[in-house]
Image (spheres, rainbow, N blue to C red):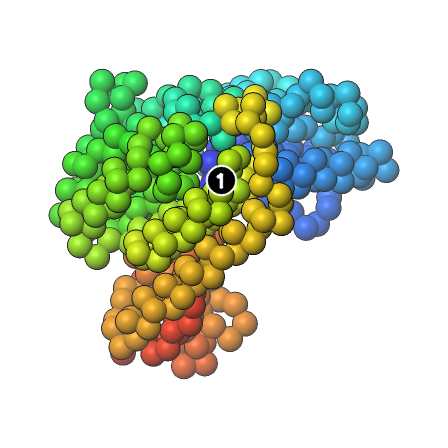
């Protein structure tokens, strides 16, 4: 199994591998041994770079099949959902193409049975102590730049009782941190319960024995359920952390992007979130070079980033995606300008991150350790999600910690995106 793209794809691959294992397949994730008879590639089709990586990976395994190194190559995921007809013509070596909701069909093709009794039992590709928990699939938002609804369909929430059972199974196998993911976690529950039900879901998950941290990703700003913040503030298991992609700040860009909000509403929302949960870590994602973005729009976004001082921030350059609302617009910002604007935003963020990290020197934090690398044990605080955020490094010659365990760490030194500390005796 080869997985490309986001955490939602990781979750899907883990579920598929769990089903295959239950059908007595020997299955490995991104094995380096090169001895697999069957390769399944779970692709990403979000933006140009991701599509290119997916196509290159498919071609690599198609070539391996031609040379007799593998017997079968199957492709699933977002790229396959979106471009199946074109890809079938271009890469005939692939044995079958599947969409994002074709798990039963993949299993049938492999002469495997779909095991309904496997509620949330998966083969984790992450370290055992943390796991992604996909709380819903698809998205009902009309954002003009985004092709996800084309690939993932309409929003469908997973019932609370199923998510609780999945979490119990994960906890039983040593998972301590749940990272809640969705295309739009803000929308959770509307289709099932007639209301946004994120707060109740978080409460129920926090009752699962063995789960210590619950982290919330991918919240949409418009219609955010504020009662979820009350649970976050009161409940010690809910990390004071929110990943909320805001994409831009000028009114004309937000309107063209069909974000359903304004600059002032966005500023008010960020302030309200910080008032409700003092000390919350806020992560956001932005887009540089959307059609029609002027130098004035860019400067306004830069000033807003400086003023708002997000704890964590990432930025993409705009990718012109067919069949999206923005595709009819003129992609008029040159690639080098998009890149320069993105770099300018990240330069501002780097300075903010450095200043915030300096304030942590001398303080002690609860750290969950993910791995050992070279001379350091590497972990994360409550303020940090895996792969995308800051890390805490502890010298392996001075301290010993077990991977997957928590430890209290006193920060001795800080850089732009990393903290260095010592385990408290």
Q: Position of residue 257 (x, y in %)?
A: 43, 31
Work out which quarter of the rendered image holds the N terminus and state it. Answer: top right
Question: Could you tell whether 302 is left or right of 159 in the image?
Answer: right
- Residue at x-position 65% and y-position 47%: 31
- Residue at x-position 59% and y-position 34%: 331
Q: Nearer the viewer, residue 298 or 320?
A: 298
Q: Position of residue 80 (x, y in %)?
A: 63, 26
Q: Nearer the viewer, residue 394 or 68?
A: 394
Q: How many marks?
A: 1
- Residue at x-position 31% and y-position 32%: 261
Q: Secondary structure at mark 1?
A: loop
Residue 133 in view in this figure: no
Question: Could you tell whether 274 is left or right of 251 in the image?
Answer: left
In the depicted structure, whether residue 189 falls above or below residue 128:
above
Q: Position of residue 158 (x, y in %)?
A: 34, 25
Q: Position of residue 21 (x, y in %)?
A: 54, 34
Residue 416 in view in this figure: yes
Q: Quadrant of residue 320?
A: top right
Q: Nearer the viewer, residue 164 or 58?
A: 58
- Residue at x-position 56% and y-position 54%: 340
In the depicted structure, whether residue 246 falls above or below residue 377:
above
Q: Name the residue beneath numbered marker 1.
A: 293
């Amino acid at each position: 199994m080869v997985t490309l793209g986001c955490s939602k794809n990781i979750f899907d691959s883990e579920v598929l591998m769990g089903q295959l294992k239950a059908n007595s397949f020997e299955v490995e994730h991104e094995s380096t041994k090169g001895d697999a008879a069957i390769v399944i590639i779970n692709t990403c089709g979000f933006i140009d770079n991701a599509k290119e990586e997916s196509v290159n990976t498919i071609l690599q395994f198609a070539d391996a099949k031609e040379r007799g190194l593998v017997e079968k190559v199957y492709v699933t995921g977002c790229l396959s959902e979106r471009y199946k007809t074109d890809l079938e013509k271009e890469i005939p070596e692939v044995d079958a193409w599947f969409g994002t909701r074709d798990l039963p069909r993949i299993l049938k093709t492999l002469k495997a049975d779909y095991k309904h009794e496997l509620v949330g039992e998966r083969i984790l590709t992450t370290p055992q102590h943390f796991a992604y928990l996909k709380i819903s699939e698809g998205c009902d938002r009309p954002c003009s730049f985004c092709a996800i609804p084309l690939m993932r369909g309409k929003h469908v929430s997973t019932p609370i009782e199923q998510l609780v059972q999945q979490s119990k199974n994960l906890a039983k196998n040593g998972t301590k941190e749940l990272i809640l993911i969705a295309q739009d976690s803000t929308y959770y529950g509307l289709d099932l319960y007639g209301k946004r039900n994120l707060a109740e879901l978080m409460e129920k998950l926090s009752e699962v024995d063995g789960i210590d941290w619950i982290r919330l990703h991918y919240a949409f700003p418009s219609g955010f359920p504020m009662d979820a913040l009350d649970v976050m503030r009161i409940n010690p298991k809910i990390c004071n952390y929110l990943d909320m992609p805001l994409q831009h700040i000028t009114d004309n860009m937000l309107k063209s992007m069909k974000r359903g909000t304004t600059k002032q509403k966005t500023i008010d929302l960020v302030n309200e979130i910080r008032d409700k949960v003092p000390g919350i870590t806020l992560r956001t994602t932005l887009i540089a070079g959307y059609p029609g973005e002027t130098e004035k729009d860019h400067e306004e976004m830069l000033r807003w980033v400086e003023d708002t001082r997000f704890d964590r921030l990432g930025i993409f350059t705009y990718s012109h995606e067919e069949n999206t609302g923005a595709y009819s617009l003129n992609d008029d910002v040159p690639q080098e300008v998009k890149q320069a604007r993105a770099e300018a935003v990240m330069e501002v963020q780097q300075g903010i991150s450095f200043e915030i990290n300096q304030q942590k020197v001398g303080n002690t934090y609860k750290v969950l350790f993910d791995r050992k690398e070279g001379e350091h044990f590497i972990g994360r605080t409550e303020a940090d999600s895996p792969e995308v955020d800051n890390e805490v490094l502890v010298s392996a010659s001075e301290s010993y910690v077990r991977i997957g365990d928590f430890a209290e760490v006193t920060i001795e030194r800080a850089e732009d995106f990393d903290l260095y500390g010592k385990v408290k005796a």
